[in-house]
Structures are given as C-alpha cells and as structure tokens.
Amino acid sequence: NAGVTQTPKFQVLKTGQSMTLQCAQDMNHNSMYWYRQDPGMGLRLIYYSASEGTTDKGEVPNGYNVSRLNKREFSLRLESAAPSQTSVYFCASSEAWDYEQYFGPGTRLTVT
Amino acid sequence: DQQVKQNSPSLSVQEGRISILNCDYTNSMFDYFLWYKKYPAEGPTFLISISSIKDKNEDGRFTVFLNKSAKHLSLHIVPSQPGDSAVYFCAASAPNTGNQFYFGTGTSLTVIP
C-alpha cells in the first residue's frame, strides 16, 4: 500500500517552460488535492477534485491547470512556469472532502 | 488574508514536559479542525481532529482543545518525546469554504532530550 505517490521529487525549470506533476493514490479515495507550501505561508490549496470527473479552483489557481485522469490519478500542469511558482508542491487525497487528507512526499520545484 | 494563524513559529520543550501549540482563526463558520505533523522532506501526516460540537478530543498523548468563543484551538502533547520534533499545522474548514481546508503557517516543535 503506497498511499499517495508523486513524481518527480525534484525539478528545475527555466522561465516559460512547461511541466506536469503527477500524483496517484491507491486508497480508493474520492477526493484529491494539490497544495503549494511556501515559507511563512503554510499550505495553500491550488485545485481540488471532489470526485472523479470534477475539478475546482482553490485559493491560488492562477498559472495552473489540473486533470483528474481517473479515480487514482490527479495531475497538475504548469503551462508557462514563472519564478513565483518556485515552491514545494503536495498532492493529497481523502475519502471525502470533509475527512482527513493523506499527503504525498512532495515535489520541490525551482523556476529560474 | 490568513484565516488560520499560528503565531508561534517555533517552540522548544524538554522531553517529558507538556508541549502546547496554539492556533487562532478568524472565520466564525469554521466547524471542523485538523492538526497535521510534518517531518522534513515528507508530506504532512494527520494527527487529530475536532468538530465544533466538541470542546475536547483526545488520542493517546495528544489532546486538542477548542474554544469557539475565542476562535482558538490548542494541541497538547503529554509527555513530549524527541520523536515529536516536527512542524505542526492546524487546518480548518467550514460549509461555506467550498470544500477546502485552510492551513496555518505551522509551528516548529523541538523536544530536547
């Protein structure tokens, strides 16, 4: 039982490049989330998917897109990376939106 | 605007003593609160929760207290152990927050052996 997995663990991008962060969970959870963590800011929700086939914006969605590929997988795409998107990105899943969330190990992204 | 605040960035406690981590919130509609623990280079892990119908919830060495009138919650760890050294985040949600949790900025706890 791997829980929530994220790839890659580390990534360095140049400004303007694009990339997709992958997330998968094996707990048969309905809801999945993408957060970013910045120093002094805590965790901020980028996008979430309450159930397969739905996605919604969180607190800081600008510059990102998401795809809920199936019940297991939820990807986050940066179309044109900017230095302000340098952060640690966490994917999480939960049985439902009001249950505790299980987090992946994070992706450390640097945009130069 | 930060709706969930953890005003102490760090806390040091001797092993065996009590650790008290505090969290304040501004949205009076928040009705469900969680605490997470995070070690370096790992994702947060769920620790304990409390809903607004209770004022206390206990799980082993961890107890969360909720004071709705003061919009304040606290996490007590008794006795503190060196393995408790981590960053602790509180999070809150409400029926009107669009299915999302709002996280505080975290408190780094160091338990000194």
Image: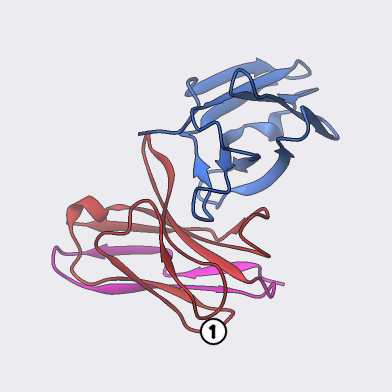
The amino acid on which the numbered mark 1 sits, given as a three-letter code, is Asn
Q: What stretch is highlighted in magenta?
A: A1-29
B21 lies above or below A20 = above
Instruction: Specify the quadrant of the image occupied by residue A19.
Output: bottom left
B2 lies above or below A28 = above
Confirm whether the magenta stretch covers residue A27.
yes
Instruction: Specify the quadrant of the image occupied by residue B68.
Output: top right
Q: Colour of chain B?
A: blue
Total label count?
Answer: 1
Which corner quadrant holds the C terminus of chain B?
top right
Q: Nearer the viewer, residue B103 or B81?
A: B103
Residue B86: % across, % down:
59, 35
Q: Chain A is drawn in which colour?
A: red
Residue B13: % across, % down:
65, 16
Confirm whether the magenta stretch covers residue A24.
yes
Q: Is residue A71 left or right of residue B84?
A: left
B26 lies above or below A51 = above
What residue is rendered at 18% in x and 68% in y? A80
